[in-house]
Amino acid sequence: MKKILLATTAMVAVAAFALTGCSDSGRGTDTGDATEAGFAADSLIGVALPDKTSENWVLAGDLFTDGLKEAGFESDVQYAGASNAVADQQQQVSTMVTNGAKVIIIGAKDGAQLGTQVAEAKAAGAIVIAYDRLILNTEDVDYYVAFDNFKVGQLQGQALLDGLAAKFPDKKSYNIELFSGSSDDSNAPVFFNGAMDVLQPKIDDGTLVVVSGQTDIKQTATDGWKPENAQKRMDTLMQGTYNSGDTVDGVLSPNDTLARAIITSVKDAGQSDLPIVTGQDSEAASIPLIMSGEQYSTIYKDTRALVAEAIKMAQSLQAGDTPTVNDTESYNNGVKVVPADLLTPVIVTKDNAAEAYAENPDLLALTK
Ligand code: BGC
């Protein structure tokens, strides 16, 4: 993916955003002191996170609370509840606007259902940063900070191919199944498209056979990123598609939570030689499975780095500077290309786990 510096047009837009931020006038508990340089150093920064569907979200909350405090900001970090998450998050963002947040960092539950709230934020002079998941179909999202999600998918697709070739050196073609994330998560199609960018040519040339025939993202989706939904679909595939002696050689799983559910399903179905299964997030429960060979791969997206990057963006805005972005082409939200600051994801297998987690003692310990 092309890494380029902020294009001139985006710069003008950013300058306009910064000015909008400056022109903010006494709402709610506005801390005042907004100057041409940005906004007051102890301003409120809101962070609205989705429901805790994977470990990365659990980690992010505490990191934001501590990091924003350390940076001298007042913070309000909220999670959407597990039930009614969309409405919950909409309400939380509105409250942050009312309370005078200068920057609102949002990990969207449903990226297509925040238009009204980010418009409110914009009208109040707040700057909106989409965190990890893009916010769709609105002009009112200013920046995107995330790991390169398309790259995540490509790495997953390549890992599946590499794992299959290594495990079954004598096979000419492999039986596989595909899983994707929740359809309300704007990342889900990006991961899937990245993976299919690598896998489709191999499906077309017959190297990979999707035995169920289910290759459409609608057929492969996992509602709510819930492991029980992935397990149910895999159970159905094992009982239907694979009940006549066929084995499944590989499964594209978009994250670790779903990978573990898929592995459980294959075991329950009595297939002893487990398939190559991909993942994402480097979850504590999956790293031991990678070391023992039950799960083939995961992706390391260091949540500490992503949160730090988002806070750095808030600090730049506070100082009246233009935040650094490295991609102004890739993340079109349906209405505009959102200037993005993308971090690089790392593929992890048993072979490079110790090296990949060298700087993360908690994860490194799990490789021992
Ligand atoms: C995140 C993944 C995570 C998934 C489920 C995605 O938007 O990027 O890291 O596994 O949500 O929580």
Image (cartoon, rainbow, N blue to C red):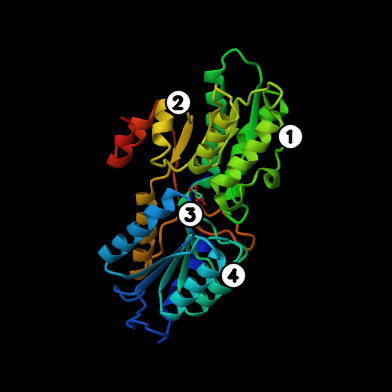
In the image, which is nearer the foreground, mark 3 or mark 2? 2
Above/below status of 73 relative to 161: below
- Residue behind mark 4: 115
Identity, as a three-letter code, of the amino acid under mark 2:
Gly
Q: Distance between the residues labelled 3 and 4?
A: 17 Å
Q: Which amino acid does label 4 sit on?
A: Gly
Residue in the picture at 53% in, 66% down: 141
Q: Marks 4 and 1, Cα distance to the nearest angstrom?
A: 36 Å
Callout in the foreground (4, 1): 1
Residue placed furthest toward the top = 170
Residue 59 drawn above or below residue 123: above
- For the residues marked 3 and 1, what is the alpha-carbon distance in whole angstroms? 31 Å
The residues tagged by marks 3 and 2 sit, at their Cα atoms, a distance apart of: 29 Å
Q: Is mark 1 on a helix, strand or loop?
A: loop
Q: What element carries label 3?
A: loop
Numbered disc 2: secondary structure? loop
Residue 300 pos. (x, y %):
42, 40
- Mark 3 or mark 2: name the one nearer the start of the chain: 3
**Front-most of residues 289 and 115:** 289
Q: Is disc 3 in contact with disc 1, using a CB cutoff of under 8 Å? A: no
Spatial CA span between label 2 and label 1: 27 Å
Q: Mark 2 points at which residue?
A: 293
Q: In this view, does 197 lie to the left or right of 93?
A: right
**Label for residue 256?**
none
Q: Name the residue under label 3.
A: 132
Q: Where is residue 180 in the image (x, y as percent from the top left)?
A: 61, 44
Residue indicated by mark 1:
213
> Of the residues under marks 3 and 4, which one precedes in the sequence?
4
Q: Residue 321: which quarter of the image?
A: bottom left
Residue extending farthest to the bottom is 26
Q: Position of residue 139 (x, y in %)?
A: 58, 68
Local crowd size for mark 4, using a 10 Å CA cut-off: few (<14), some (14–19), many (≥20):
some
